[in-house]
């Protein structure tokens, strides 16, 4: 009978171990539920959405306007045809890229070449 009591003790120990695992798992699930509950409860109001969309639209229009103004300023810069050809041949880039580089550096060939090599 002593051996039978020993077997019962082993069985009790084995049944106790699996009981610990679900508790650890449940605590993680509870944490996960708290996180997901918070996300589910948060609602986006349509007025907030409209405000955000108008802000984004305004920002895009300002950026587009600034880009157009920059292009107009660059178009005013005079560049030499020889400089464009020099940059095209040395850097092996297209005419548009060479002209753009020169215009951005106000026609200065050395600065344009340095910028294009970086």
Image (spheres, rainbow, N blue to C red):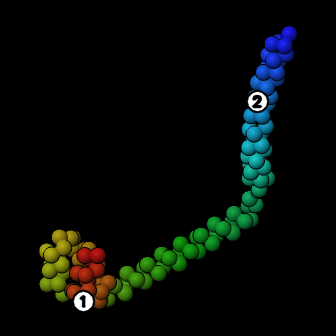
Q: Which residue is mark 1?
A: 108
Q: Position of residue 105 (x, y in %)?
A: 30, 86
Location of residue 115 (image quadrant): bottom left
Task: Examine the rendered structure and indicate whether residue 107 appears above or below residue 25.
Answer: below
Q: Position of residue 25 (x, y in %)?
A: 74, 38
Q: Is residue 40 visible?
A: no
Q: Is residue 64 visible?
A: yes
| Residue closest to the eye, 22 or 63 | 22
Task: Examine the rendered structure and indicate whether residue 107 appears above or below residue 91.
Answer: below
Q: Position of residue 26 (x, y in %)?
A: 77, 39
Please give the name of the residue rendered at 79% of the width and 26% of the height, measured from the top-left corner: 13
Does residue 15 appear to the left or right of 105 in the view shown?
Answer: right
Residue extending farthest front: 2
Q: Which residue is mark 2?
A: 17
Location of residue 5 (image quadrant): top right
| Residue closest to the eye, 76 or 108 | 108
């Amino acid at each position: 009978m002593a051996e039978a009591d020993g077997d019962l003790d082993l069985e009790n120990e084995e049944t106790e171990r699996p009981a610990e695992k679900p508790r650890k798992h449940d605590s993680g699930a509870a944490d996960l539920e708290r996180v997901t509950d918070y996300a589910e409860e948060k609602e986006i109001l349509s007025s907030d959405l409209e405000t955000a969309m108008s802000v984004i639209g305004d920002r895009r229009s300002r950026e587009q306007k600034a880009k157009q103004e920059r292009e107009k300023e660059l178009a005013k810069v005079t560049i030499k045809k020889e400089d464009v050809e020099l940059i095209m041949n040395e850097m092996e880039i297209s005419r548009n890229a060479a002209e753009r580089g020169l215009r951005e550096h106000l026609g200065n060939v050395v600065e344009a070449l340095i910028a294009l090599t970086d």
